[in-house]
Image (cartoon, coloured by chain):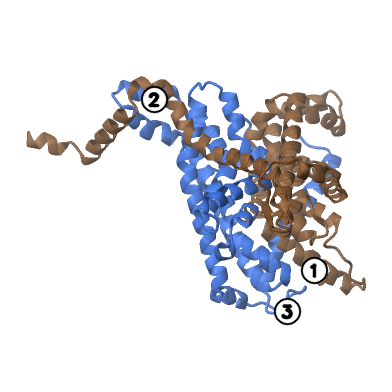
Chain colours: A blue, B brown
Amino acid sequence: MTDSLGKTVVLWLFVAAALITLSAPTIVVLGASFTAGNIITFPPDGLSLKWYGAIAQASDLRQAFVRSLIVATICTVIAIPVGTLAGIALAKYRVRFARSIQVYLLLPFTIPLIGSGIGMMLVFGEMGALGRLWPVGIACCVINLPFMIWAVTASASNLSPDLELAAANCGAPPLQRFLYITLPAVLPGVITGSLLMFILALNEFLVSLLLVDARSVTLPVQIYNSIRSIITPDLAAISVVFIACAGLAIALLDWLVGLDIFLKSK
Amino acid sequence: MRTPRAAYPLTWRVMDGLERVAAALWPARFQRGLPYLMLLPAVVLVGLLVLGLVQIGDTSLRTLDTSTFLMSEDYTLANYRRVLTENFFATVAGRSLMGAVIVTAVTLLFAFPYAYVMVRTSSPALRKVLLVALFLPFFIGQVVRAYGWLIILGNQGMVNEALGLVGVSPMRLLYNYPAVLFGLVQYMLPFAVLMLAPALTAIPAELEAAAASLGAGWVKTFRHVVLPLSRPGLIGAGLVVVTLSLTDFAIPAILGGGTQDFIANAIYDQFFRTSDQGLGATLSLMLVAVGSILVGVVFLLFGAGTLAMAEARK
C-alpha cells in the first residue's frame, strides 16, 4: 500500500515538529555541558570538559545525586514486591470488588500530584519524619505504583493457569509454583515496572520538593534551586547525568523487554 | 540412611522449610483469601494518599491566626469562602484551566500523527527512533527539560543569539504565558503518544485500505475511519493531558518565572511563602475535587472503557 504524497507530507510535518520539540532541550543541554566559556552562549566558545571536572568537585551536587539514588532505590525495593503481588492478584484471581479495587489503586494517578504531595507532607510531618530520605522514597513509590501494577498485569497474558495446574500435578507445593511458574511468567512486567519506578523516582521533582528540607535535597530539587539564580554550564553538566541515566534505562528496557511493548493494544 | 539425605540438595531442603513456614502462616483453607492478602500491601500504600487527603481536609477547615501564626482549633469554612470570593484565585484558576484546554488541543494535534506514523511505519528502525525520542525526554524529568528551554529561549539564549546574527534585536521569549504552554505541550507529548499508540494499533490497517479502495481519499479515511475508531485512545489521552497540565508545578514555575502561576504554584506559595496552611489545603482539596469530577464525568459520558486506557497510561 503506498500512501499519497499529500498524506506523507502532512504527517511528516507534524512528526518533524514533534521530534524537534521533544529532542531540542536534551540536545542543547548536552551541547552546553561541553562549552569552554563561563556562560552558555551560542555558538559555544569552544569545547572542553572543564564543567564535568567542576561537578566532580562540587560536593553538594554529588551528595544530592547520591540522595536521589537512595530515594530511587527505596522506591524500587518497595514497589517490586508490592506491585508484583497486587498485579498478579488482579490478573490471576477473580477478586470481589475488582473494579473498585482497581479504581482505588489508580488513585495515585487520579489525585493531582500536588494534592498527593501536600497530603503526604502533612502525614509525614505529623509523624515527624520530614527531612529524612525514606519518606521521599515511599512517596515516590506511592505516586508511581500504578505503573508497576500496570506493567505486571500487562504481562500476565503469559500466565497460563494450565502450567500451574501441571506443576501442582507434579507435586509442586504453592510456594514453588509461585516462584518457578508464576513469577517467571510476569518477569518482563516486573523488569519494565521496576525500571520505570527507578527512573521516575530518580527524576521526581514536585514530591521531593515538598518532602525535603535543606539537609536532604535531591538532585532535581538542587537543580531547580540553582536555576532560579543564574544559568551556569555546571548545571548542564550535572543534567547530563540525568540524560545518561535515561539513556541507560531506555537501552536496558529495549534490551530486556523491547520498547515495542508500549505499542501493544490489550 | 546417610547417602540419600546427602543426595537431597540443600536448596530443596530450604524450599521445603519455606513451604512449611508458608503453610503454617497461611493454611490452605485460607486459599480464597490469598488474592486479598496479595493486594493488601498495595492497598495500605495507597492508603497513605487517603490519609493525606483526610489531613488536607482537616487542615482546610482551620484558619491562620496572623497574630500568633498558629492554626485555629475550631473548624470554619472561612478558607473556602476566601478561595471562592478572592479575585486572585479566580485569575489563577482561569489561567490554569484555559492553559490545560489549549495544551490538550495542541498536544493531541501533534501526538496523533506521531503515534500514527509510529504504529503504521513498516520500518522497525524508524519506529525505534520515534520511541527513543519519546522516552528520552519522559525519563529525563521536568526540571532538566525546563532548563534546556531556558538555554534555548533565554534573553541570551540560542534563539535570541541566532536572531541577533541576522540583526533582529533580542525578544523576551520566556516568562510569559505562551512559553509555559509550549513547555507543557512538550512535557505532555510522550504521555499522549503512549496512550494513543495502543488504540491505533488496535485499528486494522486493512480498514484504511478498504476505505481507500472504495474511493475515499486519505483525509476522508482519516476523518471517517481512523479518528472515530481511535476515540477511546483520544479520550484517554485527552483526560490525562488535561489533568496533568492543569495541575503541573515545575513548568509554570520555571518557564513562567513566577508571573504565570498555575494552581499548583499558588498552593505551594500558600504553604511555603505565606505559611497559610489552611488556605493551601483548601486549594489542594478543591483541585483534587475538580480533577476527580473531570475523571468522573468522562467515565460517565464515555463509559469506564477509558479506565482500561487509563491503566495503560504508560
**In the rendered structure, are the residues bearing label 1 and label 3 in contact, judged by CB atoms less than 8 Å apart?**
no
Question: Separation of disc 1 and disc 2 at Cα?
Answer: 60 Å
Choose top left, top right, bottom left or bottom right for residue A146. Answer: top right
Q: Nearer the viewer, residue B129 or A85?
A: A85
Residue A167, given in percent of the width and then of the height, sits at: 34, 25
Q: Nearer the viewer, residue A181 or B93?
A: B93
Q: Which residue is mark 1?
A: B158
Q: Earlier in the sequence, mark 3 or mark 2?
A: 3
Answer whether residue B4 is visible to the viewer in this image: yes
Looking at the image, residue A90 sits to the left or right of residue B128; the answer is left
Choose top left, top right, bottom left or bottom right for residue A34. Answer: bottom right
Q: Of the residues shown, which amino acid type is indicated by label 3?
A: Asp
Q: Which mark is residue B123?
A: none
Q: Of the residues shown, which amino acid type is indicated by label 1?
A: Met
Q: Which residue is mark 3?
A: A45
Which residue is at a point 78% across and 65% down the rendered structure image? Answer: B152
Looking at the image, residue B11 sits to the left or right of residue A213; the answer is left
Q: Is residue A79 above or below residue A133?
A: above
10 Å crowding of disc 2: few (<14), some (14-19), many (20+): some
10 Å crowding of disc 1: few (<14), some (14-19), many (20+): many
**Chain holding disc 2:** A
Q: Nearer the viewer, residue A140 or B115?
A: A140
Looking at the image, residue B227 sits to the left or right of residue A251; the answer is right
* Same chain shared by disc 1 and disc 2: no
Q: Nearer the viewer, residue B309 or A106?
A: A106
Residue A37, given in percent of the width and then of the height, sits at: 70, 79
Residue A91, given in percent of the width and then of the height, sits at: 51, 27
Helix, strand or loop at label 3? It is: loop
Q: Which residue is mark 2?
A: A164
